[in-house]
Amino acid sequence: MRCCGCKVHKPACLLVLGLVIGVQIFLFQSDDAVNVFVLSEPKLMDNLPYGEHDDFREGRSCFYHSPHKFPWMPLWEKSPWTCQECNNGKCKPLVPHGRCPPFRRRETDQVPRVMSQASPLTNQKSHTLVYHHDSHTSYAQVETPACSGTLAMPCFDLNRCSRFGPVKVFGYGKTVEAWVDYAVTQTKGVDVIQKTNNPQDACLLVVGRDSFAAPEELLQSKHWKGGRNHYIFNSIELFGTHGDRPFNTKCHFGMAATSQVSADDAFSREGFDTPMGLYPKWKRPEQYRELDINRKRRLILSFRGAVYSWEQRYWQHRWIASEYWEKASDISVDTKCGIKRIKPEMDEEKRLNPGKIDYEVKDGKAHEEMLLNSTFVFCPGGGGANSFRFPEALSADAIPVVTSDFLPPFSPEVDWSNCLVRVSEARVVDIPNIVRTIPEEEIRKRRKECKLLYDKVYGNEISQHFTVAMQVWAIRIKSALRRKFEMLDIVLA
Ligand SMILES: *[C@@H]1O[C@H](CO)[C@@H](O)[C@H](O)[C@H]1NC(C)=O
């Protein structure tokens, strides 16, 4: 969907239009607070991913032909991609290497992915979230969820929050309380949040891992009120959902904001939910701590991971890289083809990991060597949009290359646009050329920015992630209050 000249989905655009442009709020750094971010109000990702707006008359590109749309072309049933290379508008087809057999993509435009009930309090009909896939670009069409980033009633009651001073936060359960304490210490001196033990007194109520034994208990809690002013941190843990299916069909979290690993741009409500990062399986070992960030690297680009014949579109991105990237000494593609198929009778664990090949653990030395020797690392999704390769690349001072539906942790408040490289699905095949044309100076700048973001967002543990989340909420709440009072001043004047 195209609106206001930008390629984002509709809720995000409405959010941006609703923002008072030019207002910037900063949290000031203080000496005490080592890990405090300087965040600004969310702004639209201004640099568009490579290949989103071109006409595919140059370079390499791939297009997906839906077998549903071309039922009369049985040949495309099994390999519905056409990949081509163009020079001055003259195009020739690309031939796959033949490492992994082609497989079909799930036709999500035909199948509603998620049916969920909106909160009874908002009196909204249940909404169906549908993915729409077209020939070469994939768009997300989402019936606007009940809540948005403007923090307005009924989803968010700003009257519970004070215009001055830190945001009062209540944490359900011991773990969340400890996170809140940690975040308060980390942001000491800049008044981001303050802990309260009284849920009625809180502006933001946070739910986490051990807050409740089951989601049903949360929904019955006295202060829940349909999820209003609630924030579910790492909602996967509580709701048992997955990137591909962010909503638990039996138990909807209503008006609460969620924080979720692997949510993509179709499901995450920008400025309301907060995307989280996956924690890396591989981290740079202590012995490599002092490596020069701008050291010489053997590889310009690498990708290591399995390709499963699972119809998720992210596996298709892996397949394209594996099948069509040029073979060159400075490009490393290390893939194995998972052969097992998803079957309906498989249990959840098996469905998520059919024929699982654990790249980080198996042959860990090769993994480490590749990461530490790469300038760019392709980080395609798997079951969801997120990838372990993303934090791993950052940990190795490499620059992650992601597809345009990937939501980096705590975006848009945390701005990753000066670090990572985003490409459209159609241009996954052209990543080798794209990264080769990035000048050394820009590479150095991006590396520096990536390192800064990695240290601040990931730190060493989950409580660091939580601290960033609290800073994001403080920014949101304070700017929403500011807008509200500015409006009021205009009315009263
Ligand atoms: C980079 O690759 C070379 C050659 O394979 C290897 O000897 C070296 O140890 C690698 N560097 C790191 C930091 O892993």
Image (spheres, grey):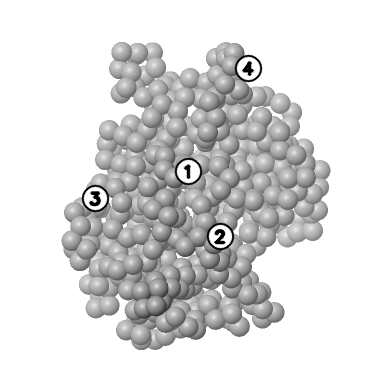
Q: Quadrant of the C terminus?
A: bottom left
Q: Position of residue 347 (x, y in %)?
A: 32, 45
Gap between marks 2 and 1, in whole Å? Answer: 19 Å
Task: Classify 10 Å Cα crowding around label 1: few (below 14), some (14-19), many (20 and above).
Answer: few
| Residue highlighted by disc 3 | 127
Query: Which residue is pictured at 40% across the width and 73% down the height?
Result: 490
Judging from the image, what secondary structure is the residue with disc 1 in?
loop
Query: Which residue is pictured at 50% across the width and 67% down the height?
Result: 472
Judging from the image, what secondary structure is the residue with disc 3 in?
strand
Q: Earlier in the sequence, mark 3 or mark 1?
A: 1
| Residue highlighted by disc 1 | 6
Residue 59 is left or right of residue 412, and the answer is right
Q: Earlier in the sequence, mark 3 or mark 2?
A: 3
Q: Could you tell me the amino acid type at mark 3? A: His
Q: Is residue 226 above or below residue 130?
A: below
Residue 255 is left or right of residue 448, and the answer is left
| Residue highlighted by disc 2 | 414
Gap between marks 3 and 1, in whole Å? Answer: 25 Å
